[in-house]
Amino acid sequence: MGKKNKEPQVCFLPEGMRGPVAPGTRVDRAARNLGVDLQSVCGGHGKCGKCRIRLLNSAGAGQSVAALSPPTKQEAAFLSEEELREGWRLACQSRVLSNAAFEVPKESRSGLQLIRKQPGPKCVTPDPAVRSQTVKMPAADPTSPSSDWKRLAGQIAAGAGKNCLYPDAAMLKTLPETLGSGREVAAVLRKDGECIGLLAPTGRALTGVALDIGTTTLAAYLCDLYTGEVLATAAEVNPQISCGEDVISRIAYAAAEKAGRKELQHLVVKTVNRMIASACAQAGIAADSVADMTCVANTCMHHLFLGIDPAGLGRSPFAPVVTRGLDLKARDLGIQIAPGAYIHMLPAVSAFVGADTVGVMLAVDVYPAKETVLIIDVGTNGEIVLASGDRLVCASCATGSALEGATLSCGMRAATGAVERVRIEPETLAVEYAVIGSVGDKHAPAAGICGSGVIDAVSQMFTAGIMKKNGNLDRRCLAPRLKRNGNDVVFVVVPAEETAGGRDIVIDQDDIRAVQMAKGAIHAGVRLLMAETGARSVDRVVLAGAFGSVIDPVSALSIGLFPEVPPEKVSTAGNAAGDGARLALLSLTMRRRAAVLADKMETLELTAHPNFQREFAMAMHFPHMRPRHPGTR
Amino acid sequence: MGKKNKEPQVCFLPEGMRGPVAPGTRVDRAARNLGVDLQSVCGGHGKCGKCRIRLLNSAGAGQSVAALSPPTKQEAAFLSEEELREGWRLACQSRVLSNAAFEVPKESRSGLQLIRKQPGPKCVTPDPAVRSQTVKMPAADPTSPSSDWKRLAGQIAAGAGKNCLYPDAAMLKTLPETLGSGREVAAVLRKDGECIGLLAPTGRALTGVALDIGTTTLAAYLCDLYTGEVLATAAEVNPQISCGEDVISRIAYAAAEKAGRKELQHLVVKTVNRMIASACAQAGIAADSVADMTCVANTCMHHLFLGIDPAGLGRSPFAPVVTRGLDLKARDLGIQIAPGAYIHMLPAVSAFVGADTVGVMLAVDVYPAKETVLIIDVGTNGEIVLASGDRLVCASCATGSALEGATLSCGMRAATGAVERVRIEPETLAVEYAVIGSVGDKHAPAAGICGSGVIDAVSQMFTAGIMKKNGNLDRRCLAPRLKRNGNDVVFVVVPAEETAGGRDIVIDQDDIRAVQMAKGAIHAGVRLLMAETGARSVDRVVLAGAFGSVIDPVSALSIGLFPEVPPEKVSTAGNAAGDGARLALLSLTMRRRAAVLADKMETLELTAHPNFQREFAMAMHFPHMRPRHPGTR
């Protein structure tokens, strides 16, 4: 703690994302590490002027200098003197010297779908699978010229005493053009002695990419393998969506379409290559210098990425083709990084519990558990793990996509214009809401409602008495926002005049049922895991996943997404699956731990369980307890 | 020896190739193992009837049955009763039961270029890099279904107690379609536990391919990895010839042409794939069941096959990119065999002494040497190795292609129509010759003269006194075949009326000079190697290489290709480089031995040696000794 207190604290508004950074950290990297959406058109070279941010509480140049490094030439080119006085800076040009708060205006954001898969603050002692060693190539002895490789290996061995060095075949192809006698080169070496690439010895860090392949979203984190710093991130929508929204429809597509499996693999690989190129451009490095890679994914995405037939995942007995951790040559998958680099696929558990959940477990680090901890990872699917004593019992819940807002009457994904927070004043039943993309007090026009907004709304409707315990809207309630439409009743979250489309944004009875189904599936699953382990209560809950990181813990508790725990015992872990991939990228110890965790995790097949239907029916109802939000009376 | 005497001996005429075979061996395989050219259009299934051969000295059905298995239905379909009585059989349908001699008629030969790269009779205890294990897949447990791979690995481990099993990525893709629960499958496993492929458990042998990439010729041997038997061979002209006849011009092509290096690699890979497919068709197996591969090549062909820039091989200090033995995934080179199979590249020594020479040394097995042994491998280049005590000193000689017959006035490669043997009756100076492709006493029409024919002719001209010690034709000699043409004198080997082209096939003074240059380079090289090792004489000479296997040892001795040794101390080793590849394919012990040999071999750079020019000038002359052929007076 002592060390942390000396590190400057930064805070980005309006999100309020905050955290410590090392002195001298570039503001754009600090922002990205905290998950703040920030444009970077030129890749952080001060050439586009798009990453404008404002240092807040700036009383002039004096304080600005103290909190940040002095303005650069590039900043002077894009910012007037008056703007500089007001605290405006380019995030890629300024470095944090002491505590600072920033405003990130809307125009400095990428404005694309708000992909929340941002790296979390997890720390690990780096122990990467690759290292680089700078050597100087001696000239060949003309009387007895030994091979380029032999001379290189001799130099490496002289520096590190490594005996069993061997070359990758693709690396060998680059040897003649990279090595001139007398030139220095950084050899990239795996732990077992394989030389997988040669880099110009720029003194730059060795980098790797952690990849998270979600059903809906792909995220890549370019990391410094020695410090663990995230140098750049890239995220895109999984292009397989054009072949099916969910896992089941992708399995069907792979089976039904000619070369469907190849097409699905190609779609992801192409996008991943683009993401890597983009992240590398942001960080100013060449993609073919990326020396290592790890990947988490659910088991279907995992199989499709490897070009493996996923059919077995969709039919009884639901056996995956392979679950163990794999070290593959990235080129075997068509991934364009260093010529001989590997990609480590984290281990999966079963057809339903994938390497992504193993990544979550690696990141949340609750095993072996002193208390009973429930981990819920809500993405397009919901995975739950109960850590209790020496056991890790897990299951996948068919939540549908209601909790992501996708299938609701006015639902949308968590993008600009989505209602993400809803509060209902208990006395007046007046509605307040927050929209993604709003700046300060100025609402962005609402276009729909996303997952966290739906859970908030349902929770608040229940707390305010607008909705009954069984989920029915109370027709007798006189809330002004309850609109009767013949036999139907809907709750108006945003009236038409405040929306982008000029149409009420509502929650209807079907939406409530979809939320009930989803939360009922999770809650019932948790009950069965508890029964399996003999746990009588849950001590702590960790919400993970893109959705888990935006959900309001109290609202989640209030609708009964999981059994009762004190609200302060509910925490969010952000994109923990991606964090797990990052941890495994940085540390072989973490890879070994992932193997242990995957081995330890037991999958419970919920729908086959004799008690599931009963538990599910019970869990559909809303709980008696109505936890109050701080600030509501 | 006792065992060998019990094995049937077979002999194929008119070549007279003979050797022992295991009882029950198919005649076509016996023929191919001995290097006899035999058609196999249908792949040895008795469907084309093209591999007709005649059992000689057959006195009727009685003896035929004793020497060979009874005629099959397929044979009855292609051969009349009279033909069967005369001893005609299909080679692919008949099996050797006891000693037998066969006539191979011209129409049963492929008639293509006679590629002499046929496997030799070398023996080794098989100890291959891969093994197969037949396992039965258990069904997945529906309550806790483990992955296909886990169940497979469990079965393999149960059978063999192997712990560190791991799957190849490409093999995994084939897993779902190959494995059904309850189905049997043969898992192909490497020594380190990698599972590289799955085969249907046909009870067939595990097979591998030994590949010999020569500058001019490619040869592939499909072998049974357990017995070492050569199941089929395939040979083709190296298609890179279209980009340059020799190593130097290919290096130039790779440097000068855009994507030249890629093109050269692609040409060879495409041809190798076709050869593998052809050999597999002959043996009736699928190419994707070929489980292992080894390769020998000179260092330039080696680099081009791997897609490595060969430029360094053509300029001082003549450093190769890599010489050590390499285990590469065959798919990384585009070679189409089992999905996860490797190709082992034998180690090379230097830019001039390649893995082919290491293969030769593996096959001739003279290290450590009790006597001083000289190994000469004459292909498109000439490599020489002197084994003396604990030392293995080697060099490459710029022989040009005269010894292959390619650049002579009437030269041609060793194909049908080439004069391959020449005898000059010392008294009458009458000329006898043999032509490749002749049957019995009937000459095929001569079209040119190949390497062995040239050496024979020059040797005989010298022995008969037609040519002087300095290589000049003796104008005063009254040999009827010496033709004066103004100032020029030529020796007519075949008069116009006996040739295919109606033009004399001659050897002129320039041809003799080219032979002198080539033999002088080799002889001078040997002298320098002797000086280097302190050896005062050579005890034994081994002639290897496609050319070495057809050269007449006495003629070679007579022209002074190497220092004097008793003629009975000169032996031929056939395509020893290919044999070396085959030995390494069959045995990991042999691969380790190849590494030891390559490490032990010292290259002497001849042209840089201060004494080379003097030795070369001396070696140009023909020697005093004139060894006589048996049969000449």
Image: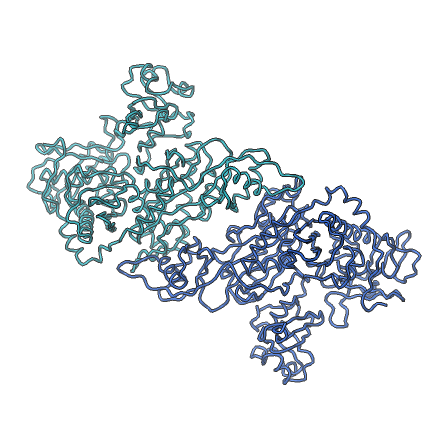
Chain colours: A cyan, B blue
The C terminus of chain A - image quarter:
top left
On the question of residue A487 being in view, the answer is yes
Q: Is residue B307 left or right of residue B378?
A: left
A404 or B185: nearer the viewer:
B185
Q: How many marks?
A: 0
On the question of residue A174 being in view, the answer is no
> For the view shown, which residue lies furthest in the left direction?
A476
A202 or A592: nearer the viewer:
A592
Point 51% across, 44% down: residue: A163
**Residue B237: x percent and y percent?**
65, 57
Q: Is residue A621 left or right of residue A17?
A: left
B599 or A137: nearer the viewer:
B599
Q: Is residue B180 left or right of residue A185?
A: left
Point 37% across, 33% down: residue: A229
Q: Is residue A453 left or right of residue B23?
A: left
**Residue A416: x percent and y percent?**
28, 34
Q: Determine whether B268 is above or below A279 in the image.
A: below
The N terminus of chain A - image quarter:
top left
Point 71% across, 52% down: residue: B382
Point 28% across, 46% down: residue: A380
**Residue B389: x percent and y percent?**
67, 53
**Residue A378: x percent and y percent?**
25, 44
